[in-house]
């Protein structure tokens, strides 16, 4: 796959029932696309493909496209691959360009957990989810899967907390020096994520386990629930649109539903084999962080040095708006790669509830020098 990435942006990420609680998914996307238009990005796509996990119904991508002022003649597709919905939306758009079905595609994702269908529980408001495995297979809640993984992999509470602190620190540092500000299109005047918070190891150590009395996972080393949107504009490699980067390959793998947090490992390994890229060539990995346990397991199993792993922090700090996160990972990865002064490639990957894993290979602007030899 050799597809141009013309632009990659995101909205600020809000907490569930936080600063974006009254902003409908369509309005999140409208403001995001309006901001990209103001930056001179092409406005006439042949197709819109958006990922979404909890606002399904009525082809949300179509509603978003119309709300954003995209021509009614442009078709739109909503894709549900749970947490990897946005990542697979980008892959789907890339395939459409590869086959000649489109020359310009708006991909990404949108999620408003604040406006998702909810049920009232004795403990408060919780999101109601659909089954992620059929009857007869274990369909555990993600927190239970994470605590089981911690036991199986020998990951301690202290190790998970230290990882979470590192993610928070990297996220705050990137914001303080203005690195991540370039990714964001403001929504209702806000251009800063709501989630990053001052965190210390001692503070995290005081938190009680969130899912099991003797569990490793807490509110501090698990990602929050969030609202947000992402937009990755894709174009044919022969087009005249200037490239911010390139989509160079993808992999989607399956696994056991009750071990889905481990799947980024096989997704990355499959992607490297498919594209014939050695791990040493990868400048950076952006891997989603639903739980510190999951991210730490994948980093260890893949043997990636900490310096190349989520260099600007991850979802533990900035949040995980499900269907939008894949596009956010690509946006963050390109942000990092394009600050290097040489051709560079990176991988964005994530686990998928229900037992799948997804990964994409992305190159920076300068990687164009390699493309004829790819």
Image: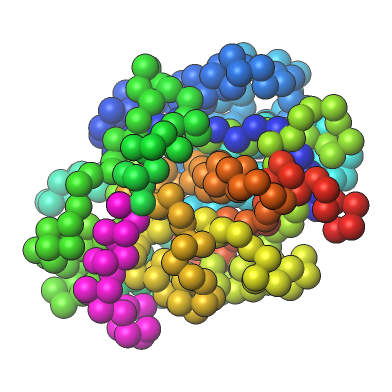
Q: Which residue is rendered at x = 85% and y = 27% of the image?
A: 240
Q: Which residue is rendered at x = 49% and y = 46% of the image?
A: 325
User: How many numbered discs sit on the rendered protein?
Assistant: 0
Q: Quadrant of the C terminus?
A: bottom right
**What x and y, as percent, mark residue 100?**
89, 39
Q: Nearer the viewer, residue 226 or 369?
A: 369
Q: Which residue is rendered at x = 37% and y = 17% of the image?
A: 188
Q: Quadrant of residue 161?
A: bottom left
**What x and y, as percent, mark residue 10?**
50, 33
Looking at the image, residue 297 sits to the left or right of residue 22; the answer is: right
On screen, residue 314 above or below 293: above
User: According to the image, what is the colour scheme of the structure?
Assistant: rainbow
Range of the magenta residues?
A: 149-169
Q: Quadrant of residue 130?
A: bottom left
On screen, residue 242 above or below 310: above
Residue farthest left in this picture: 206
Q: Is residue 192 magenta?
A: no
The answer, for residue 371, to whether it is visible in the render is yes
Looking at the image, residue 3 sits to the left or right of residue 357; the answer is: right
Q: Main secondary structure of the magenta part?
A: helix
**What x and y, as percent, mark residue 253?**
63, 68
Looking at the image, residue 372 sits to the left or right of residue 3; the answer is: right
The answer, for residue 133, to whether it is visible in the render is no
On screen, residue 350 above or below 263: above
Q: Which residue is rendered at x = 68% and y = 53% of the image?
A: 344
**What x and y, as percent, mark residue 132?**
46, 62
Q: Is residue 153 magenta?
A: yes
């Amino acid at each position: 796959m050799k597809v141009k990435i013309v632009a990659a942006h995101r909205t600020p990420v809000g907490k569930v029932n936080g600063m974006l609680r009254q902003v409908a998914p369509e309005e999140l996307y409208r403001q995001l696309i309006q901001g990209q238009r103001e930056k001179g990005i092409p406005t006439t796509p042949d197709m819109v493909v958006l990922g979404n996990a909890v606002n399904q119904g009525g082809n949300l991508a179509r509603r978003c496209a119309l709300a954003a002022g995209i021509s009614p003649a442009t078709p739109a597709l909503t894709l549900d691959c749970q947490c990897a919905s946005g990542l697979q939306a980008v892959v789907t758009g890339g395939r459409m360009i590869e086959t000649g079905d489109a020359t310009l595609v708006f991909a990404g994702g949108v999620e408003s957990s604040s406006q998702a269908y909810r049920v009232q529980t004795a403990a408060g408001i919780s999101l109601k989810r659909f089954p992620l495995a059929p009857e007869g297979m274990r369909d555990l809640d993600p927190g239970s899967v994470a605590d089981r993984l911690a036991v199986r992999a020998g990951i301690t509470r202290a190790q998970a907390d230290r990882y979470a602190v590192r993610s928070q620190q990297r996220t705050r540092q990137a914001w303080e020096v203005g690195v991540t500000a370039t990714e964001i299109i403001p929504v209702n005047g806000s251009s800063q994520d709501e989630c990053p918070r001052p965190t210390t190891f001692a503070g995290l150590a005081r938190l009680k386990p969130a899912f099991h009395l003797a569990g490793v996972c807490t509110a501090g080393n698990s990602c929050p629930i969030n609202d947000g949107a992402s937009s990755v504009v894709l174009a044919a490699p022969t087009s005249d649109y200037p490239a911010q980067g390139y989509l160079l390959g993808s992999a989607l793998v399956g696994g056991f539903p009750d071990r889905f947090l481990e799947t980024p490992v096989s997704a990355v390994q499959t992607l490297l084999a498919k594209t014939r890229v050695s791990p040493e060539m990868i400048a950076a990995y952006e891997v989603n962080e639903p739980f510190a346990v999951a991210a730490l397991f994948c980093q260890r199993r893949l043997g990636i040095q900490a310096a190349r792993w989520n260099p600007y922090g991850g979802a533990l700090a900035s949040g995980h708006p499900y269907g939008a996160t894949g596009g956010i990972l690509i946006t963050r990865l390109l942000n990092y790669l394009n600050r290097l002064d040489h051709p560079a490639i990176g991988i964005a990957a994530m686990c998928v509830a229900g037992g799948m894993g997804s990964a994409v290979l992305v190159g920076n602007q300068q990687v164009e020098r390699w493309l004829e030899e790819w």
